[in-house]
């Protein structure tokens, strides 16, 4: 299969999610996963701005990535923060523990096994709503063509958020972003429930929840709520095709 075919299919799949009731977390988790599966990143994560303007973690491609991004927010230093505040791409940076533009973050990232990083803004023209982190276990930069595709994925996600605001006004967008951030807490709770019931690592739980939601045409947040409430059927956490 030519390389272009899965890229085009992914763009179409992302565009297909942009309906009135699309799930923000599922959309952005898919964005992070595609950067890993299609573009050669070792890990990826997405942060969104809250109504107050501060960044919050919304999606990550792995548990290690989630922990690292939480640290980035706590330390208030790192590529995702820079991409968001400047609205510009953070070029490929080879990490050095205790050195470089983000000394504490670099040390934590290297401890997690990453050697280099870059970041892209989620924006449309002058409006920036978040940022995409791209991590690598090696020091070689991403192919420039892959960076262009990653930015296209990020721009498509940004357009979906900004179109929603244009159609429903700023207040409803703030409510949606707030709900997405609140739902992230619900997703983490559901991951813990599924991990315990299935006897798997939490990193495996989210793909199973997403696969079940997609296969049954349900919103991920509704499936997560059912898991937390104890009403989700056991087939949801049994081993199966995972997205």
Image: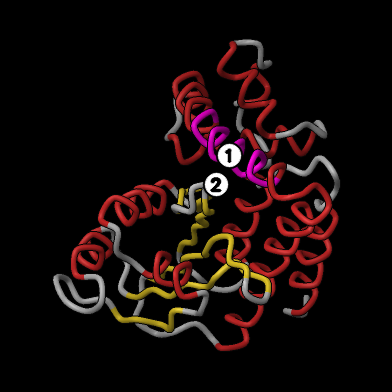
Mark 2 element type? loop
Do the residues bearing badges 2 and 1 touch, measured as CB atoms within 8 Å? yes
Q: In this rendering, would 180 be left or right of 50?
A: right
How far is mark 2 from mark 1, CA to CA? Answer: 7 Å
Residue at left 77%, top 44%? 22
Q: x%, y% of residue 151?
A: 62, 75
Q: Is residue 175 above or below residue 189?
A: below
- Which disc number belongs to residue 240? none
Residue at left 61%, top 44%? 177
Task: Please give the residue where the numbered disc 2 appears in the rendered image.
Answer: 51
Residue at left 85%, top 44%? 20
Q: Nearer the viewer, residue 235 or 188?
A: 188
Examine the structure image and report whether residue 104 is included in the region drawn in magenta.
Answer: no
Q: Nearer the viewer, residue 25 or 142?
A: 25
Task: Please give the residue where the numbered disc 1 appears in the rendered image.
Answer: 178
Crowd tier of the residue under label 1, counting other residues whose Cα lies within 10 Å: few below 14, some 14–19, many 20 or above: some
* Most distant residue in the bottom direction: 144
Residue stretch in magenta: 173-186
Comes first in the chain, label 2 or label 1: 2
- Give the quarter of the image for residue 33: bottom right
Crowd tier of the residue under label 2, counting other residues whose Cα lies within 10 Å: few below 14, some 14–19, many 20 or above: some
Q: Main secondary structure of the magenta part?
A: helix
Q: x%, y% of residue 239?
A: 61, 32
Residue at left 54%, top 86%? 143
- Give the quarter of the image for residue 240: top right
Q: Nearer the viewer, residue 76 or 145?
A: 76
* Most distant residue in the left direction: 98
Examine the structure image and report whether residue 181 is included in the region drawn in magenta.
Answer: yes
């Amino acid at each position: 299969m030519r390389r272009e075919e899965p890229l085009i299919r992914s763009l179409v799949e992302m565009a297909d999610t942009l309906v009135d009731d699309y799930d923000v977390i599922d959309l952005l988790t898919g964005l992070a996963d595609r950067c890993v599966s299609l573009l050669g990143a070792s890990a990826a994560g997405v942060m969104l701005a809250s109504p107050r303007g501060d960044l919050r973690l919304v999606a990550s491609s792995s548990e290690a990535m989630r922990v690292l991004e939480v640290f980035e927010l706590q330390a208030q230093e790192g590529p995702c923060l820079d991409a968001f505040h400047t609205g510009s791409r953070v070029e490929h940076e080879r990490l050095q523990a205790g050195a470089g533009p983000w000394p504490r973050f670099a040390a934590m990232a290297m401890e997690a096994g990453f050697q280099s990083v870059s970041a892209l803004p989620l924006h449309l023209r002058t409006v920036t709503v978040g940022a995409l982190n791209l991590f690598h276990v090696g020091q070689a930069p991403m192919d420039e063509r892959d960076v262009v595709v990653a930015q296209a994925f990020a721009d498509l996600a940004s357009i979906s958020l900004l179109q929603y605001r244009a159609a429903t006004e700023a207040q409803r967008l703030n409510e949606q972003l707030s709900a997405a951030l609140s739902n992230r807490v619900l997703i983490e709770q559901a991951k813990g429930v599924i991990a315990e019931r299935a006897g798997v690592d939490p990193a495996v739980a989210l793909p199973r929840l997403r696969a079940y939601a997609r296969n049954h045409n349900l919103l991920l947040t509704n499936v997560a709520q059912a898991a937390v409430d104890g009403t989700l059927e056991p087939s949801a956490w049994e081993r199966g095709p995972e997205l």
